[in-house]
Image: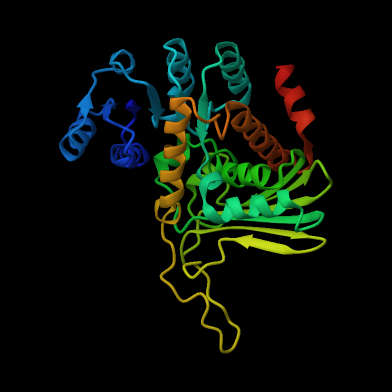
Amino acid sequence: MRLGVIGLGRIGAFHATTLSALPNVESLVVYDPVRAAVQATVDRLGVEAADSPDQLMKAGVDGIVIAAATSVHPELILSSLEAGLPTFCEKPVAADPQQGEQILARTEQTGIAVQIGYPRRFDAAFIAAHDAVKSGELGTVHTVRSTTLDPAPPPDDYVRHSGGIFRDCSVHDFDAIRFVTGQEVVEVYATGTNSFAPIFAENDDVDTAATTLTLSSGALAVVSNSRYNARGYDVRLELHGSQDSVAAGLEDRWPIRSTEPGTSFPSGTPHSFFMDRFADAFRAELAAFTEVVAGTRLSPCTVADAVEVGWIAEAAALSLRHHRPISLDDVRSRKATR
């Protein structure tokens, strides 16, 4: 097949490399507003270049991968739908979940497949945790703990345009919890602090957050996030049930140091970056998208999934601001009356 990639920043360049190595991808067409990024990708991978997203979509491609800035996700998804092209788009669908609902409605009208990028759904350990819940071997799940701790904060300009820690970082935990448990979030309580760089407070953001989610069964999920975890990139998911408990992320490169006497685990070099920790998952995610383009698989992470995660993030931001629990019904009704 022939695919197009729009956006050649850090993740877009990685996706172009991954796609070019897949056996069922015969050719790639790429676009980025930064011409140097396009030329670097053309020189490195031998792919074709387009002068605009519109030209790329008319270049005989079978599907589109969108890795551009969040602000242009909605217009690019809509353009791709109008062109009748199956689409992969990095999260989020839109900065505002209400706008995401509009994209969802259009996606449902066209019937064109859209896959949103949440790579933990393709990580082997997260899949095994999902399967353990689905099989019933854990019994009744009562507690979930999800962790994403970055080794260092992103650049200041990124912070200014990220939408805050819940919309940028915590969403990966929120989606993983929905995916693994098969449950919806009904209520959110979030708190956060700033202990380091002033850029976060200057943008109504926090550098460390804790969020408690009440799931539809009544189970509780606790999400921990921070921009400052010097030992490395720490991503884990624990599930505790009435019959058993499992965890994803407890492997030899887990960035933590045990203080138990005589314990050497974990002894590997700690993960330092999300593309290091989830390299295999990113590849599996894009391989899945080629199956979506071929029509042999339904989207494994739909616009509806991503929009729901957007509402959870919105509820968390409101909870932090108002210092109280926020129900998902409440946050939707607040948006609907604006």
Look at the picture and state if 129 lies above or below 82.
Answer: below
Question: In the drawing, does residue 309 fall left or right of residue 12?
Answer: right
The colour scheme applied to this rendered structure is rainbow
**75 and 300: which is toward the camera:** 300
**Toward which corner of the image does residue 28 lie, by quadrant?**
top left
Q: How many marks?
A: 0
Q: Residue at x 35, y 36 (%)?
A: 12
Q: Residue at x 40, y 55 (%)?
A: 276
Q: Looking at this view, name the residue that lies furthest to the front.
A: 296
Q: Which x, y percent locates residue 175? A: 62, 41
**13 and 148: which is toward the camera:** 13
* Placement of the C terminus among the 4 image quadrants: top right
Look at the picture and state if 254 lies above or below 201.
Answer: below
**154 and 6: which is toward the camera:** 6
**Toward which corner of the image does residue 68 lie, by quadrant?**
top left
One can see residue 317 in this view:
yes
Q: Residue at x 33, y 18 (%)?
A: 53
Q: Which x, y percent locates residue 61? A: 33, 20
Q: Which x, y percent locates residue 245? A: 72, 63
One can see residue 194 in this view:
no
Q: Residue at x 53, y 27 (%)?
A: 93
Question: In the drawing, does residue 188 fall left or right of residue 208?
Answer: right
* Placement of the N terminus among the 4 image quadrants: top left
Q: Which x, y percent locates residue 300? A: 56, 35
